[in-house]
Image (spheres, rainbow, N blue to C red):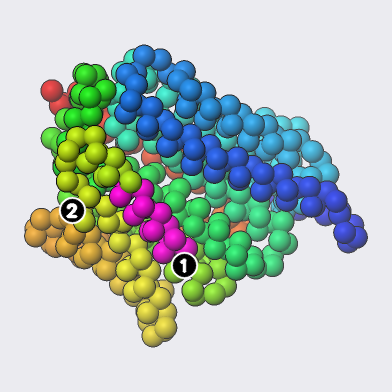
Amino acid sequence: MRVATRPGPEPSADRALAGRLLWTTLGLLLLTVGVGLGWDRAWHASHAFDTFYSPPHLFIYATTVLEAALVAYLVGSRRLRAWFGPTFRLPALPYAVPGALALLASGFALLLLAGALDDLWHSRFGLDETAWSTPHAMLGWAWLLIVLGIVACRLALRGGEPLPWYEALGLGAILLAFSVAPLLGPLAANPTAERVRAAAALPVLAAQPAAQHTFRIYLAHHLDRASPLLLPLGALWAGAALTVLHRLARRDWVPLLAVALVSLAMLASARRADLYLDAALGTHLAAVPATWLPLPLLPAALAGWLARRLRLGAGPGAALAGLVFALAAALLWSPPAGLLLLPLAVAAGVLGARLGGAVFATLAQPTAAGVGRLVAVAGLLLPLAVGAIDLYLRASTP
């Protein structure tokens, strides 16, 4: 590995331009996901599936191409990429690339691959694929890798200086929001079996056998928050996410505020979905807190904050956060037998904290080995693993 030569010490328009292009990429990404995915869900709830090339899909992929073009420009410009820290060689390029940009570009490469696979899957199966299908899982992980790449690039542009609190807050909240779906899949999207049944009863979806098969998979295998899998997986997510947030921010209150903001956004989104289903179907989902309460990351974050205040150490703090998350989730959604998994959730919280520490170390110093491991595991191995589960569930569920 060699270190890229920084431009001279004078104020550089190139550095400012690199930062603006990075923020523009993030803004377009938020537009893609915030508008595009919401539009896509509404489209499927009101239009029968007949083609992959629906207006929301075209919007998502058109804006994604714009984002990828901006990143390609950053990678291809010698003057701009010089600001993004240490470099290493990529086999496909004749020049060395900063590790932060390599992570960001890898996320977009995986996103485009996932889009192509999504076209094949939808063309073959229609709407008959769970959130764990390889294309859907790869899309989620690719978007998370892109956000991680943007964080790594921002850290590199800062030259080792800590982020301002408002940047740490914004980037931390975005990281949290993008990490839920990849790690928890349908357990995040399906709060209760009642919500799944209500969605399945929407007239457009009720008339599509492929969509009904997916709903039967969710119901037959209890792929909602009553699943015992939520306790260890949620504790793992809490440990990893909270660790990354605390490494990103200098002040203890910043991660707490980021978690609170994301939790409020989750609550508002779930309430809006419940009210829509109640109005369309005459159900009473909005009267059941379990359908709209957010995942209990905020109590876990408060527990971790208290552990740090008491100077209990990182390991006990992560264990306490995992325990609180799992206990709150069990009380809200799981049957009483789920409490037996609390020891596993404690261990998962500690493991999650270690994984989160390793991920942040890669963001702060993105070496070839670190970026390669992160992309291979998150972008390829995990989507293929859960994709195999999706295929099994589809084959085994009538």
Please state if 65 lies on the left or on the right of 340 as rendered: right
Q: Is residue 218 visible in the rendered structure shown here?
A: no
Which residue is under mark 1? 257
Disc on the earlier residue, 2 or 1: 1
Image spot of residue 206 (x, y percent): 20, 23
Mark 2: secondary structure: loop
Q: Is residue 267 magenta?
A: yes
- Looking at the rendering, the stretch of residues picked out in magenta corresponds to 257-271
Q: Residues within 10 Å of mark 1 (few under 14, many from 20)?
A: some
Q: Residue at x 51, y 69 (%)?
A: 254
Q: Is residue 359 visible?
A: yes
In the displayed structure, 143 sits above or below 48; it is below
Quadrant including the C terminus: top left
What element does badge 1 sit on? helix
Which residue is rendered at x = 27% and y = 56% of the image? 293
Q: Residue at x 52, y 23 (%)?
A: 58
Q: Is residue 368 magenta?
A: no
In space, the residues marked 2 and 1 are separated at their CA atoms by 26 Å
Main SS of residues in magenta: helix
Point 29% across, 40% down: residue: 276
Q: What's the residue type where badge 2 is placed?
A: Val
Determine which residue is flagged by label 2.
Answer: 288
**Looking at the picture, which amino acid does disc 1 mark?**
Leu
Q: Residue 23, percent across and down?
A: 66, 48
Q: Is residue 141 above or below residue 50?
A: below
Residue 156 image offset from top left, x and y in percent? 69, 56
Pointer 2: residues within 10 angstroms few (<14), some, or many (20+)? few
Residue 24, image x and y in percent? 67, 44
